[in-house]
Amino acid sequence: MKSGSNLEKILKAGHFAFTGEVGPPRGANVEALREKVSYLKGNVDMANITDNQTAMVRMSSWAASIICMQEGVEPNFQMVCRDRNRLAMQADILGAYAHGIRNMLCLSGDHQQFGDHPQSKGVFDLDSMQLIGMVKKMRDEGKFLGGADIDGPPELFIGAAANPFAEPFEWRVHRLAKKVAAGADFVQTQCVFNMERIRAWVAQANDMGLTDKVAILPGITPMKSVGMAKYMKNKVPGMDVPDEIIKRLQGVDKKNVADEGIKIACEQIEEFKEMKGVAGVHLMAIEWEHKVPEIAERAGVLPRPEV
Amino acid sequence: MIVAERKPFDEIKNMVSGYKKVLTVGCGTCVAVCLAGGSKEVETLNAELNLAFGKDKIEFGAETVERQCDMEFLAELDAKADEYDALISMACGAGIQFLAERFPNKPVFPAVNTSFIGVNLDVGWYEEKCRACGTCVLGLTGGICPVTLCAKSLFNGPCGGTNQKSCEIDKDQPCAWYKIHERLAGQDRLGQIIEISPPNDWSNQKPRKVIQPGYEERVKALGR
């Protein structure tokens, strides 16, 4: 075991992992956070705690991760390269580990221009690949990036993100290979809507032997409305929403659109359960945490295994 | 070259109001080429300032030297500067500071914002190309700078926001890593970006000096 995290144990035991996500509050509203987490308890193996997502200031991801743990859900501490230099990153990694955090996700972070402080200086001292490598070095060699020994190395399960949908497509699997070489233990993908693309990408990863080395968890986001689907297609960079999805949502009665969105998500999950090289799914029910119990139930992933 | 843009007129006007005799100093090199601070722009700025203040309130003089980043050329101003109680520099940030160093008793005001190291795309149209990071990786990246042209200065490929061929910050901004991939693919050199680039040495985080090989003794003799 590298970290002994719940997710690591679930994967090691060969179970199909099911992870969730919680965005910390725009303030110190602990009750709101506890409520969001409560919907995930018992329904997911681990919850990603986002780090100033979309470059909006929120409660820090490590602090919200601790609250998540107190509520009985294992957190996945997200860290973006935008807001911290390598000193602050390593300090927060040690602090998070000291408080019992065992998973972390290494990300570039949305550009600061999208958020509520567009004039800020983006740090990007390291990129996500270098961050993965740094966490691995801290864990496996017990050394800081600068080379000095760590007095009590952080034993973390290292996560990375992948976007199988960007162009050029043939490069995408090599991006995954690079993250695996850097030290990623698990990979959560961008929200999947284009199933054809992800099938091809996972097949390439299988062919290159990558899925033996890293656990791939495709991202699932149920569409709440036609408007959301159109927004994600047209406005969110890196998102690939095929027209069939929008047509399918448009094809049902207005009051059934959200239900149809969940149905699509469940169909995707069913396919991933059977897909060689896929170790689980990551559910990003954006501002829809209260629906997670229902989605988990309908996706047939309950009860979550005890490991 | 170094590319600059003239500051908004009111900002310049506010800096010099209250002085009696002001010398506007242009620079004949980069800022002249990019149409921000050469002799022509000095003339234009002075004309605007004269119009705003009236000739009897502030007297504006004009001089343009070959390079404000070179003491040899600044020396040409020694006799003239004494007649003025403030200076405006239309050079880049380096020139402005060297002018201020040459005349430490005179207030020196910048009339331009220094923008970037860039290239000439067409008359009046420039594009940033280099951040002077001090650790050039262009040999690995097909001659396209990821520090400058990737909005996150990523060294190991694009972020998740790469949007077809564009950067997430703007559809009109190409994704630097898309371009790097395209160029290296064309040269059959994709192997170069399969390797992981280690964390960068940000040597531009402290003031830098360069002494070229063979000039160390000379610098020592100058005592600086």
Image (cartoon, helix red, strand yellow):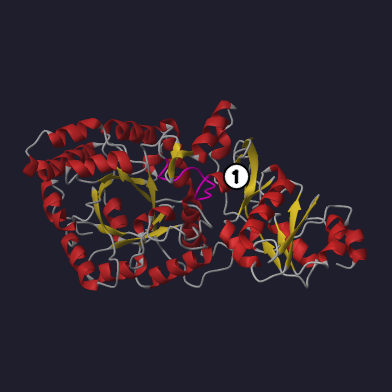
Please provide percent x and percent y for residue A227: 20, 43
Main secondary structure along the magenta-highlighted residues:
loop
Camera-side residue of A295 and B60:
B60
Camera-side residue of B130 and B179:
B130
> How crowded is the residue under tag 1: few (<14 C-alpha within 10 Å), some, or many (20+)?
some
Please provide percent x and percent y for residue A224: 17, 46
Q: Quadrant of the C terminus of chain B?
A: bottom right
Whether residue A241 is visible here, answered yes or no, is yes
Whether residue B153 is in magenta: the answer is yes
User: From which residue to which does the magenta span run?
Assistant: B150-162
Dot 1: chain letter: B
Q: Quadrant of residue B53?
A: bottom right
Taking the image as shown, residue A278 lies to the left or right of residue A244, namely right
Please provide percent x and percent y for residue B162: 42, 41
Whether residue B208 is visible here, answered yes or no, is no
Q: What residue did someone put label 1 on?
A: B128
Q: Quadrant of residue B200?
A: bottom right
